[in-house]
Structures are given as structure tokens and as C-alpha cells.
Image (cartoon, rainbow, N blue to C red):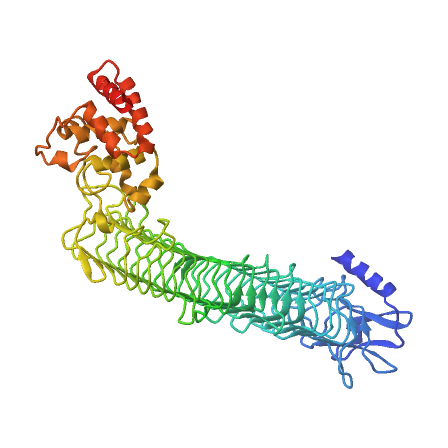
């Protein structure tokens, strides 16, 4: 350090021009033999402290123009490298008749060659500071700089108990370091601050930057409840890094206040803490490693990143959450989240026991087009004015979800719940999107307006889920309801059930499991039964699934208690080959069977709406897992000789047919090749006859030189005759 100070002194003496009659004096009462006021060209330029014979007496220096009385310059105040001094308390303040201690103070060093107790009591200057070197001490009360600060630094290695005020317009390029365990004073910058401010311990004073912050403010401890930062903008290069907890406030000047850099809290934000800005711009970040029990307020738009590593018990509010913005909370959100307009960002929470309003209080003019993901349970409330984006919940829903208001707002997006839907989803207007509950629904799904979308409970036969609660549609159903498990509760539709386009894409209620005793499907309006249908055990007959006695479908006050093909109210039958699902296997099943064999599934669905899901059960006659020409052989046997079919194919585990299981006489020997060919010619559409001929020829070849091969050769001959 010795070489550095000598160099600075020489440079300062050589570089700084001597102003007329620049006078530096010590007016605190110290002996002139204890210090040396250096001169260049007859002008005072700096001070070297030689000794401290009165250690309890504060040092007081000032510089002034002896002609005008205006503040003068001090290039440096240092301690002589060859001397030993005791405790020093030093001020640069105006003496009697002078308001300020100096104009410019280029360098002040009480650290090198000084005692570790050396402190600054007060600095009050009107001009620049730290142009040629640092201001350094082990503590300070107050520092006032009237003009520019930097590019060198203010280093206070101990506590600062008063204020640091920099009144120049900036930009201020020097750094400020406070190394004490606490900072209780205030800092004020009249312009931009490009330098860094470092606190070696905790801080509980105010920092006011009446400009942009392009440097970093670092607090090694806590930012206590009396601490605050107010700034116009935090630039891309600027930021705040608090290693401990934030009990105080980060705020902004009105009509400014962008965070374009980073605000990081290594601990938690307490309930009294507050982070606010006008805009959180793209690529900016608010990062809290611990809990956030205070508030985060964004008065305009949030387009950056907010990350909370713990729980969030406080509030998060923004006027608008934009598309590239993200909010991530690793733990539970027990506080609240709200916006006043559009939400196109993405949010991800560990769980939600608090409330979300997007926007508040559910204004349908501002849609939610972004995404909300909750990786656990939701026991709080979610209210969305209009949903065009996605809500995904990995756990249970034990709190309500509201979509829309009486003034408008539809569900056009997706709600997916992986756990149990135990509370309610309430769509105040139309459902044009999707509600998918992967787990059981023990609560309710309510749609007050028309339903054009889909409500699905469960995933598939491998992951079914039950409806023990209710689905209540307050108007017309023009979409699809599917329950992959059992229906124990009620489905009620206050209007009509329609397939508006007549293309088999809507007007369907599908139950893959059991329609349980005392459950109801109630349609108050019309059910045309054209391309509309209700299907129980839709995915193919299963012994465990059925339309139980006592379960009712009500259509316009008329009740139905079981399979009613004429109305397209289906309970999938248990007979292999029953392609018309009327409970018997006969010649009327031949043509629809050929449709399926020929892969005319669209035609089959048009003719038999509601039976497409069961084709694999009904048409896979040999139970090999495929529907192909080889099923024609088994199907023909089922028609002509059902008892022989049962003997050859029936297995209660892998090839079930309830007629075979009944162990009653089914008859047999009902005809030979000519009778089968005649049935094909009579009951198969002429356009599909080539399919039967091809199948018969392939079967004759496959079974060549066997009685079965001879049978199919005879069928081919009869068909071609």
C-alpha cells in the first residue's frame, strides 16, 4: 500500500491545477506539529497526518478559497507511512463561517498505516469525490458528496451509522463498501449509480438512487426492516444481492422502475418484506432462495423470471404477466397470486393452499392464455376470467376452480387434474375446451352454459377412474363426456344432447365401466339418437362392467333401464359376433361384420353409432388379438354351429362369450357351405361380396387338404355360381 499512496500523492500534486489561494486547515484543535499541509506552487493540495498527540480530539479539516470564501479542494488526506498514530476520528466539514468542508475530495485514507479504529465522523463536500483514489476508513457516520462520485471507491470497513449522500447528477462510477456488521444510515444518489455498493454485514438504512442502478448492491447479511432501496431502474448490468433475509423493501420511483437485471435474496423475504417495480422486463430475474412471506408487486408488466426456492406465504401481483415470463415456487403457495389484465406467462408451484385470481376479480375481458402447473395438491381457490391456456394439477383438487363470470368468459383451454377431483370445477359460461380428471371425481363439474368441448374422467381401461360425484350441465351438451371407470353419481344435462355437425364428433356419453345401481343420466331436453349415443361398457364387454339394475337414463322424463338399440342407448353385449349389439348373433350381423373385416370402420360407426369401441371384442372371433380374414371362419362357425364354435374357441379368461358360458344347448348343424354362401349373398352388401370371396379363398387355401378346406372351397364355388 505504501507505493500506491506515494504514487497517488505525486500524481495528485502534479495533475490538479492550483486554484487561487486554495487553503486547507485543521480547525479541530490539533497541534500543527501533528500534521503537514502539503503545497504545490504556493497552493495547499493535501494533508499528511504525522502523529496524534490528542487521541480523544476529533480531526476537522476544511478547504476554502481565501479570496472568495468558496469551498476549496483537497487532493488527499493520508497517514504518514513512517509514523505511528493512535485512534483517529476525522471530518471534512466547514469551519466557522463556512457551510461545506471542501469542494473536491480526491482521496482520503485512514486505513493504511492507521489504527483499526480510525473512522470518518462526517464528510460534507460540494464537488467531486474519489477522482484520484479511494476514501477509506474503518467506520463512518455520514458522507455528503455534492457532485460526482468515482471512479474510485468509498470503503468503510466498519459500520456506517449515518447517511451517505451523493447529490451530483451522475453517473457515479465508484464503488461503496461497508464492511461493518450493520449499516444504519441512508445513501442518496441524485443521478445514475454505475458502481457497486457492498455491505459486509447487515443493512437497515435507506438507499435512494434518483436515476438508474447499473452496479450491484450486495448485502452480506440481512436487509433489516428499516432497510429500503428506491431506484428509477435496475439496468441489465445492475442488481441487488442480499445473502440473508429481506425484511425491508425494494421499490421504485413512480412512472419508472424497471428491473432489467437481477434481484437475489439468499434467505427469505419476511412478512414485512416487499419487492416492487413497475416492469420486470424480459431476461430479468427476481430470485428468492428461501420462503417469500412478504409481497412482490409489479405495477405494469412481468415479462421476466420469478423464482422462489421455498414456500410463498405472501402475495404476488402484476398488472400483466406476459408470455416469456415465468413464476416458479418450489414449495407451497399459501398466499395469493393475482393480475389485473392478461396472463400469458407460465407459473409452476409445488402445491397451492392459497388463492389465484387471473385476473382479479375474474374479469373476462382479459384471458389467461398462459399455463399454471401445480406439482402437488390444490386446496385453495383458482379463479380465471377466461381460460384459453392450461391448468395442470399433479395432485388432488380439494379447493374450487372458477372459470368466467356472469359478464362473460369461457373455458377454451384445458384443465387437467392427475389426482382426485374432490371439490369443484365451475364454468360460469361455455365449455369449449377440455376438463380431464385422471383420478376419481368425488366432487362436481358444473358448466352453466353450452358444452362444446370434452369432459374426461380417467385415462383408459388400464388407468380407469370413477365418477362418484356429479357432472351438471346447465344448458346444451354438444361435446363428449367419457368416464373410463364406473358412474356412481349423476350426470344431468338441462338442455339437449346434440351432435351439431352430424359427424359423430359430439353428443356422446361414454362409460367404459359400470353404470351403478341408483346412478342417473338425466337429459331434460332432446336426445335425437341419430349420431348421438350413450354407451355403457363402451370399450368392449367385461364381466366386471355392466348396466346395473336400478341405474337409469332419463330422456325428457322417459326412463330406460338397459340396452335399447333403437335409441342408441347401449350396454355392450357379451356375445362374440353380435355386431349389431342386440343380444343375438344372426344373419343381420353378417354385413356389419364384413365392414369391420374390410376395415370400413367409419361406415360401421355411421351405421351403429356408439359401437366402435367394442369392435375388437365382437369381431375378434378367434380371440387372437387381431380382426382379419381368419375371424371369418370363426364367425361363420358361430352362425352355423354355435356349440361347435364354443367347443373350439371358448375360454372364460381369454375368449369369453356369455352364450358359451351359459352351458345351455345352442343348437348346431344349422347348415353347410351352400347355406352359408346363401346367407352371405342375401345379407352382405353387394359391394362387399368380393371381400367375402377373397376371405373364403384364403381360408380354403389355408385349410387345404382338410375338411375345413373343403368346406371353404365349396363356399367359394357357391358364391361364384
480 relative position to 551: left or right: right
The outermost residue toward the right is 41
- Location of the C terminus (image quadrant): top left
Residue nearest the observer in this picture, 409 or 391: 409
40 relative position to 121: left or right: right
Residue nearest the observer in this picture, 140 or 458: 458
Residue 94 vertical placement versus 576 (above, below): below
Residue appearing at x 39%, y 71% in the figure: 406
Q: Residue 380, located in which quarter of the rendered image?
A: bottom left
Residue appearing at x 78%, y 86% in the figure: 97
The outermost residue toward the bottom is 97
Task: Estimate the x, y position of residue 62 in percent, counting from the top left.
Answer: 78, 77
Task: Estimate the x, y position of residue 142 in percent, counting from the top left.
Answer: 66, 75
Residue nearest the observer in this picture, 184 or 258: 258
Looking at the image, can residue 603 be seen? yes
Residue 25 vertical placement versus 647 (above, below): below
Task: Estimate the x, y position of residue 699 in percent, counting from the top left.
Answer: 28, 22
Task: Estimate the x, y position of residue 462 in percent, counting from the top left.
Answer: 29, 42
Residue 50 vertical placement versus 701 (above, below): below
- Location of the N terminus (image quadrant): bottom right
Amino acid at each position: 500500500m505504501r507505493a500506491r499512496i506515494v504514487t497517488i500523492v505525486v500524481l495528485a500534486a502534479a495533475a490538479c491545477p492550483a486554484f487561487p489561494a486554495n487553503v486547507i486547515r485543521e480547525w479541530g484543535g490539533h497541534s500543527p506539529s501533528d500534521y503537514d499541509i502539503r503545497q504545490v506552487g504556493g497552493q495547499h493540495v493535501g494533508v499528511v497526518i504525522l502523529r496524534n498527540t490528542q487521541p480523544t480530539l476529533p480531526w476537522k479539516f476544511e478547504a476554502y478559497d481565501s479570496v472568495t470564501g468558496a469551498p476549496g479542494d483537497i487532493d488527499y488526506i493520508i497517514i504518514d507511512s513512517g509514523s505511528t498514530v493512535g485512534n483517529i476520528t476525522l471530518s471534512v466539514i466547514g469551519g466557522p463561517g463556512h457551510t461545506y468542508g471542501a469542494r473536491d475530495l480526491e482521496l482520503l485514507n485512514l486505513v493504511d498505516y492507521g489504527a483499526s479504529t480510525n473512522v470518518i465522523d462526517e464528510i460534507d463536500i460540494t464537488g467531486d469525490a474519489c477522482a484520484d483514489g479511494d476514501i477509506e476508513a474503518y467506520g463512518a457516520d455520514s458522507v455528503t458528496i455534492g457532485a460526482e462520485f468515482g471512479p474510485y471507491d468509498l470503503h468503510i470497513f466498519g459500520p456506517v451509522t449515518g447517511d451517505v449522500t451523493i447529490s451530483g447528477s451522475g453517473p457515479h462510477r465508484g464503488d461503496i463498501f461497508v464492511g461493518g456488521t450493520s449499516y444504519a444510515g441512508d445513501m442518496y444518489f441524485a443521478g445514475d449509480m454505475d458502481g457497486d455498493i457492498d455491505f459486509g454485514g447487515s443493512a437497515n438504512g435507506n438507499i435512494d438512487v434518483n436515476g438508474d442502478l447499473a452496479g450491484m448492491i450486495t448485502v452480506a447479511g440481512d436487509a433489516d426492516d428499516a432497510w429500503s432501496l428506491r431506484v428509477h431502474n435496475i439496468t441489465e448490468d445492475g442488481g441487488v444481492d442480499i445473502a440473508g433475509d429481506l425484511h425491508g423493501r425494494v421499490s421504485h420511483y413512480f412512472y419508472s422502475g424497471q428491473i432489467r437485471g437481477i434481484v437475489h435474496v439468499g434467505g427469505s423475504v419476511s412478512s414485512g418484506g416487499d419487492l416492487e417495480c413497475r416492469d420486470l422486463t424480459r431476461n430479468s430475474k427476481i430470485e428468492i432462495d428461501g420462503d417469500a412471506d412478504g409481497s412482490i408487486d409489479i405495477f405494469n408488466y412481468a415479462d421476466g423470471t420469478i423464482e422462489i426456492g421455498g414456500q410463498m406465504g405472501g402475495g404476488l401481483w402484476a398488472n400483466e404477466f406476459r408470455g416469456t415470463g415465468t413464476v416458479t415456487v418450489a414449495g407451497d403457495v399459501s398466499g395469493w397470486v393475482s393480475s389485473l389484465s392478461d396472463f400469458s406467462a407460465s407459473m409452476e408451484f409445488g402445491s397451492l393452499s392459497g388463492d389465484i385470481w387471473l385476473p382479479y376479480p375474474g374479469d373476462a375481458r382479459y384471458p389467461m392464455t398462459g399455463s399454471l402447473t401445480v406439482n402437488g395438491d390444490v386446496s385453495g381457490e383458482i379463479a380465471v376470467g377466461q381460460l384459453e391456456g392450461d391448468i395442470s394439477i399433479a395432485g388432488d383438487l380439494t379447493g374450487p376452480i372458477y372459470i368466467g363470470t356472469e359478464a362473460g368468459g369461457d373455458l377454451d383451454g384445458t384443465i387437467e387434474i392427475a389426482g382426485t377431483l374432490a371439490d369443484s370445477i365451475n364454468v360460469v359460461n361455455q365449455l369449449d375446451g377440455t376438463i380431464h380428471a385422471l383420478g376419481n371425481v368425488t366432487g362436481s363439474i358444473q358448466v352453466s352454459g353450452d358444452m362444446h368441448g370434452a369432459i374426461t374422467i380417467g385415462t383408459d381401461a388400464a388407468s380407469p377412474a370413477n365418477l362418484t360425484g356429479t357432472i351438471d350441465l346447465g344448458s346444451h351438451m354438444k361435446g363428449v363426456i367419457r368416464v373410463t371407470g364406473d358412474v356412481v353419481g349423476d350426470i344431468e344435462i338441462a338442455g339437449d344432447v346434440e351432435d351439431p355437425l352430424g359427424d359423430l364428433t359430439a353428443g356422446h356419453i361414454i362409460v367404459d365401466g359400470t353404470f351403478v345401481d341408483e346412478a342417473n343420466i338425466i337429459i331434460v331436453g332432446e336426445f335425437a339418437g341419430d349420431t348421438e349415443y350413450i354407451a355403457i361398457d363402451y370399450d368392449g364387454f367385461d364381466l366386471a362392467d355392466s348396466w346395473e339394475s336400478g341405474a337409469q337414463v332419463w330422456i325428457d322424463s322417459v326412463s330406460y333401464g338397459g340396452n335399447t338399440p333403437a335409441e342408441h342407448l347401449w350396454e355392450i353385449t357379451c356375445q362374440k359376433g353380435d355386431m349389431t349389439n342386440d343380444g343375438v348373433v344372426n344373419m343381420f350381423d353378417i354385413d356389419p361384420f364384413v365392414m369391420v373385416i374390410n376395415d370400413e370402420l367409419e361406415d360401421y360407426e355411421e351405421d351403429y353409432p356408439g359401437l366402435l369401441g367394442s369392435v375388437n371384442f365382437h369381431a375378434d372371433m378367434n380371440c387372437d388379438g387381431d380382426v382379419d380374414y381368419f375371424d371369418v371362419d370363426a364367425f361363420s362357425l358361430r352362425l352355423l354351429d354355435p356349440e361347435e364354435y364354443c367347443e373350439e374357441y371358448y375360454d372364460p379368461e381369454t375368449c369369453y362369450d356369455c352364450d358359451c358360458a351359459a352351458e345351455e344347448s345352442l343348437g348346431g348343424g344349422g347348415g353347410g357351405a351352400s347355406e352359408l354362401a346363401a346367407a352371405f349373398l342375401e345379407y352382405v352388401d353387394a359391394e362387399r361380396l368380393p371381400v367375402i370371396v377373397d376371405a373364403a379363398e384364403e381360408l380354403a387355401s389355408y385349410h387345404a387338404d382338410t375338411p375345413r378346406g373343403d368346406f371353404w372351397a365349396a363356399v367359394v364355388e357357391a358364391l361364384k355360381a
